Image: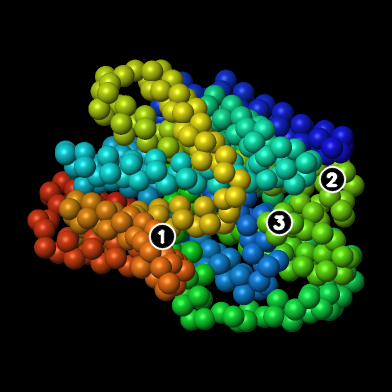
Amino acid sequence: MQTEQLISLAGYFLLMLGIGLYAYLKSTDDVSGYMLGGRQLSPAVGALSAGASDMSGWMLMGLPGAVYLTGLSSAWIAVGLTVGAYLNYKLVAPRLRIYTERADDAITIPDFLEKRFNDRTRTIRVLSSVVIVIFFTLYTSAGIVAGGKLFEASFNFPYVPGLFLTAGVVVAYTLFGGFLAVSLTDFVQGCIMFIALILVPVITITQLGGFEGTARSVEAVSPALLSWTEGVTVIGLISALSWGLGYFGQPHIIVRFMAIRDLPGIKTARRIGMSWMVVTVIGAVATGIAGAGYVASTSTELDDAETIFILLSQILFHPYIAGFLLAAILAAIMSTISSQLLVVSSSLTEDFYRVFVRRGASEKELVLVGRICVLLVSLVAIGLALDRSNSILSLVSNAWAGFGAAFGPIILLTLFWRGLTLKGAVSAMVAGTVTVLFWLYAPVGPEGAALSSVIYEIVPGFIVAFATAVGVSLFTRQAPEPVLVRHDEVMAELKAAGA
């Protein structure tokens, strides 16, 4: 093990724990503060928190690895995500910020949906909570897998202790510091990721002799790596770009919009967040493509394509800087894990415990339950992550599609169409989830393969859910008058604010 790298990583861990302690001392007295930070996030913290919790280990391991193997044709996913993120800021963020506050200060997505439709049966709250718990536990395990792979590839550290170390630090600051700790650590982690995804590709390209030298090195491996269209079919392109559809239904991202302190802050957050995303996505793609040229031209060995960022960090940089760059990967991983743990904890606490177990629970009791839920969910995710053969990209893509299909159409229609009914929303959520699961696991494709081998499951899932929501709503009774009045009031407020 490199002592200098370990010192850098230890410093990073201490910083994260210190932020968790600060947040614990500052603002975790009530459930709103623990789960949503009292809706007082600044635009900068909100934007980088959303970006960092969004990208996870996928940004520094999954995407560079995919580009390393197949070239620029894999970068269409990044294009789709960038467009989707912009539309999410533009379409969802301002409306959700106002609507959740007007809907009796809803602090979770299931809570908002129940209040939006005035659902006294609690059907939509329970159903959406179940979807969140299932898919986020899977999503969280992807981050823990990435942590285990990081320690294994960087220090020859055993995989299992590595994933326990990663999960342990995240659980500590999330459990004690709540939403404020998660958001502040995300901000710091977003800054680290930003610097790292500029440094690594720039130094790699410089080592290869600039852009021309890099192009020659990559072409020596395969000219196809520099082609955006090599091997790309129309269906493949649709699958890649459709990743952007997932943004509208990601609870750990859109909850940040609910927490930004005011409506003008949303526009500022959009500018900061999109600038951050464009730079980091380009850096991740450049890392993969330049890494392919570097490995080939120097005859370096690389066993796992998803560790190309780690390899370049260790070879090209001083050990202290390499430690900082490894911390960037941990930052990406941990920022997402912490956000997901908090969303699942919020759902279990607000949407199950408070509703079905202890309706009169005190604020202090609910915060305690939230912390226990963080611990329990993390243990289940660690159990799933023990299988190190899991691909980070495949785990993330499955969960991303599940959320995108289950929540995306409903969130959009809820915010834009007063005609969406409770039955329409519930039917759409079931239809989207079932379609994604069928596409993933039913052996009905070519030669018994799953249909996900034909087209990314979010495409049929989103289409089926959207069509179901509209179709069922048109043939069911209109929402109660108070629900329609509140919707019109929110739209009028947004129009007056120029949003």
Contact (Cβ within 8 Å) of mark 2 with mark 3? no
Q: Which residue is mark 1?
A: 440
Can the viewer see residue 71 in this picture?
yes
Q: Which residue is mark 3?
A: 304
Query: Which amino acid does the dot numbered 2 rest on?
Result: Ile
Q: Nearer the viewer, residue 473 or 401?
A: 401
Q: Is residue 138 above or below residue 241?
A: above
Q: Position of residue 90 (x, y in %)?
A: 45, 61
Query: Which amino acid does the dot numbered 3 rest on?
Result: Asp
Determine the residue positioned at 21% across, 39% down. Answer: 122
Instruction: Indicate the secondary structure of the residue bearing disc 2.
Output: helix
Q: CA distance from mark 2 to mark 3?
A: 22 Å
Q: CA distance from mark 3 to mark 1?
A: 24 Å
**Numbered marks: total:** 3
Mark sitting earlier along the chain (1/2): 2
Query: Alpha-carbon neighbours of circle 1 within 10 Å: few (<14), some, or many (≥20)?
Result: some
